[in-house]
Amino acid sequence: MQMNKVTFLPHNREVEVPAGENLIRAALNAGVHINASCGGEGVCGKCRVLIEQGEVAGGISERLSAEDVAKGYRLACLSGVGADVVVRIPVESSIDVSVLNKQASTRRKATIKQVDFNSLKEQGLFIPPVEKIFLELPPPDVQNNMPDVTRLIEYLKLKGNEHKLELTLPVIRKLPDVLRQNDFKLTVTLVRPVRDDGKTLIIDVQPGDTTAANYAIAMDIGTTTVYGQLIDLSSGECLGEYGDFNGQISYGEDVISRIVYAEKPEGRKRLQEVVVATINKVIGEILRQAKVDHDNVATITLAGNTTMTQLLMDIEPRYLRRAPYVPASSLYPPFCAATIGIDINPKVIALLYPVVSSYVGGDIVAGVMGSGLYRSEKLTLYLDIGTNAEIVIGNKDWLACTACSAGPAFEGGGIEFGMRASKGAIEDFSLDPVTFEPMLLTIGNIRPKGICGSGLINMTAEMLEMGVINNRGHFNRDLNTPRIRSNNGIWEYVLAWREETQIDRDISLSEPDIDNLIRAKGAIYSGCMTLLEEVGLTMDLVEQIILAGGFGSYIDLDRAMTIGLLPEIEADRVTFIGNGSLLGTRMSSLTKRIRKDVVEVTKKMTNFELSETPSYMSNYVAAMFLPHTEIEKFPRTKQRIEGRGRQ
């Protein structure tokens, strides 16, 4: 990927960005403020910059006069970086250096971890648990007229060194015709046992050589969304990916409301039917994308939280929300996917990730397995952040886990203008240190219509550092800006005026919004601290943090630490794995090692119920400040806040 250097004057800040990157996003990544409140659509005309060296693509608008364009002025939000470029921010050119030092630091995000299949092969781990073998059997004659099944098994033993073989009745029914369709040349699909003393199952036979067409489906059954991937078991490549909203949303947005609905007559049956319908839709789409036939899918692996797991399997979930919070089972045997209504080759065997407790489910176990945490020497903190936050601490020798309810703030819930991360959501934010005018960027670079989770974090952190809010999330009412106002007795900061939005209303961030964020981040941070305390450790011993979940790739690490969402740790020790559940199911499709290890790993995970842990509430109350009532726990944030207070 071609990278270009952008230099911002008078700040003398440099940042490297991919070719074609939007100039205003480059500025944000460099920690340079440019006034902009239209989200990057180009309608407010406030993001004028002067191109002093190099060229950018676009950037010309009716907001700029012909004379301005001739001088080299462009709108940053409409400009694409195609080469090294030097950009001057005109509004800042005469500001005192001490004010410039108030600018935000360079954006730092977690390192994104990719699955390295070559590494898997080198480690001897790339051993798909479902294998296709092409055979050329000797046809029967009067001297050798043994039964077809016996002929197949004996040949596999003799030529393939395969033992402990078992066939299903559908395969026996199919075998005679398949053998004779292509002169006793056929492909056999074998499912390897999880345990060394188990049997290899023959689940399918096909005429001719179909070994090149061997596929697996990996699925994450989330409370909100269902994601699937189609995996080529020969190469490890993902051939298709698709996600859709879980149809159960119509019956409740969270697991508790779904459990309540499941207690109604026919409720559980209905919830099982609608989630399977969503699964089938996702499967149909990824097979369509890859132009793969249902018959060539050999296996499917699924993972979800404990409630989603039990609802998928049509198992009574009511005891998950009642003390002492007992799941029906931690382990589930392999089963024929068609038996629960999954629309796939009826011979396909489904594997379901095991769960640990009522609130630490198979999605977290899958993340622990897929991320490699369970094989790591490093003491690791694993965080899956969403409406519920699941936390795991440990390494290859031991693991402890817990879950806490963070609430919906990170997904836009409980925030007046909150929304999920989609087009028009404000995702990044900066403040002018003198005028307190905003710099907004939205997903899709269009007019704003709301605030997503990453935007909420960035706004709150920036306002705290600039002194716009205090450590309780209350606005500084003495600042000379029209953007801070009282609206029906509630203090707020106006992010975008009505004429700059899509919704014909001012978009603002209010003190109650910030309070909801504080509660959410407080729950997560205190969950981490409580779990560490319960195993006799402190944060300074943690060697790495692994982030999973929907918006981990968008979180600016410094800002997440500034508000006290994450403990302070060096950015290069934070890794983002994306959808940990989907990663784990994909890895399970590709390596038999994970299927063998997962049972032992699950047994190794000691669960702590925070509601039964006395220290949790004390930690939670202490975390109800920005970043924390004990700011000494966040020395870098303390230094920045106190340093700016002296300027």
Image (cartoon, rainbow, N blue to C red):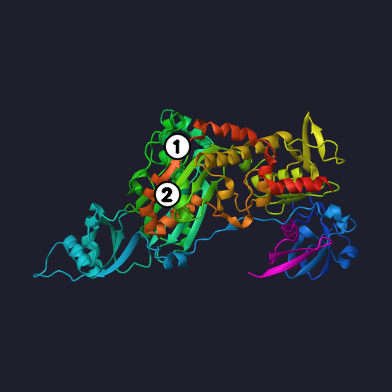
- Looking at this rendering, what residue extends furthest in the left direction? 143
| Circle 1 residues within 10 Å: few <14, some 14–19, many ≥20 | many
Disc 1 versus disc 2: nearer the observer: 1
Q: Which residue is mark 1?
A: 358
Q: Is residue 127 above or below residue 634?
A: below
Q: Residue at x 69, y 47 (%)?
A: 635
Which quarter of the image is occupied by the N terminus?
bottom right
Distance CA(mark 1)–CA(mark 2)? 17 Å
Query: Residue 587: which quarter of the image?
Result: bottom left
Q: Is residue 343 above or below residue 328?
A: below
Q: Position of residue 76 (x, y in %)?
A: 78, 59
Q: Residue at x 66, y 70 (%)?
A: 2
Q: Residue flagged by tag 1: what amino acid is it?
A: Ser
The segment highlighted magenta reads 1-30
Res 176 visible: yes
Q: Position of residue 483 (x, y in %)?
A: 82, 40
Query: With 536 as the anchor, is 26 left or right in this view?
Result: right
Query: Residue 8: which quarter of the image?
Result: bottom right
Give whichever of discs 1 and 2 has the lower sequence position: 2
Residue closest to the eye, 158 or 202? 158
Q: Please give the count of numbered marks on the rendered protein.
A: 2
Helix, strand or loop for disc 1: loop
Does 116 lie within the magenta span? no
Q: Which residue is mark 2?
A: 302
Res 424 visible: no
Query: With 282 as the anchor, is 478 left or right in this view?
Result: right
Q: Position of residue 579 (x, y in %)?
A: 52, 51
Query: With 393 as the anchor, is 140 left or right in this view?
Result: left
